Amino acid sequence: MDPHTTFSLPNLLCEEDDSSLNDTKSKVSNPRSEDDHYIRSLIEKEAQSNDYNCVICDDTTRNWFKCARLDAIDWIFSTREVLGFHFRTAYLSLTYFDRFNSRRVIDNGKEWAIQLLGIACLSLAAKMEEQVVPSLSHYKAQGYNFESSVIQRMELMVLATLEWRLCCITPFAYLHHFLSKICDEGECNEFLVSKAIALILDFSKEVNSMDHRPSVVAIAAVLLACDDQLTRNALEFKIGVVSSLHSLEKECIYRCYNLLKNIETKKNTTPESKSFELLINHRNPSSNIGIKRKLTYNGFEQKCPLQKISRRL
């Protein structure tokens, strides 16, 4: 790590450990009583958070931002592959990205600001999750060449906007526990883990991560990975055997399950599943990310200071 271009966050501890998602190689083990207690504590922390269901996006900016967000997600996933990050690191960066945009507004058409925000969020997530963190010069945005000092300034803006609360819970914290509870012991295998992860990644492209609680996304993905033909009664029966889920609204889970199913149906009309391809090839990353053009930003635009009262970029 280059100490001149990165900074560490030694006092910030993540709510997840390596056992929550060690790529797709972790074996699903039998649940223990202490696991139930831990999962319930995570769900309780979600309930105490004010981050969910707080997305603000008016109709005039919705279409532009949706396209810009998708470009940022594609860049995050591609860079994750190049740098060898965990999938949970990429998802965590997307959580930062969506939380930031739920509190600040990026003006319509400022693609450079979206790109810069994506870099800052992935860099911060890597510092939270990865053992080896690359210098900021390794984050190559498509079409832009941001200096390290500019990325650091955006990191500070993200930290200030999120009030330094980087210990976010992601769906990956729940996956193995829910799989061990929902699926039969003989069915809990690496393929189901990979399928659930792919579902979560596809979901993140289409739906803002602040729209649904991580536990709801996780259980919906696990249910769909195990069975894509569940009726409402069958779904509620499966949910009922997981004691840690009793505090969640079944309607939210059912709605998320159907939303995931619709996304997968739509995706399967295309020739290839890119998210599943990421899972298959995650140990054989490409060497480069294509760059269309070079634009250097030595600082933010003068019209967009860090402390602007309107809270717009």
Image: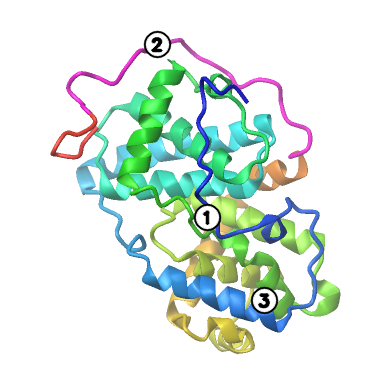
Callouts 3 and 2 close, C-beta under 8 Å: no
Say above or below: 22 vs 70.
below
Circle 1 is placed at which residue position? 203
Locate the C terminus and report the quarter of the image it occupies: top left
Depth check, front residue: 238 or 27: 27
SS class, disc 1: helix
Q: Which range is magenta?
A: 282-305
SS class, disc 2: strand
Q: Is residue 283 magenta?
A: yes
Q: Tell me: 59 left or right of 179.
A: left
Circle 2 is placed at which residue position? 296
Disc marking residue 35: 3
Residue at position x 24%, y 19% from top?
Answer: 301
Q: Among all residues in the image, which is located at the extreme right?
A: 186
**Residue type for callout 3:** Asp
**Foreground mark, 3 or 2?**
3
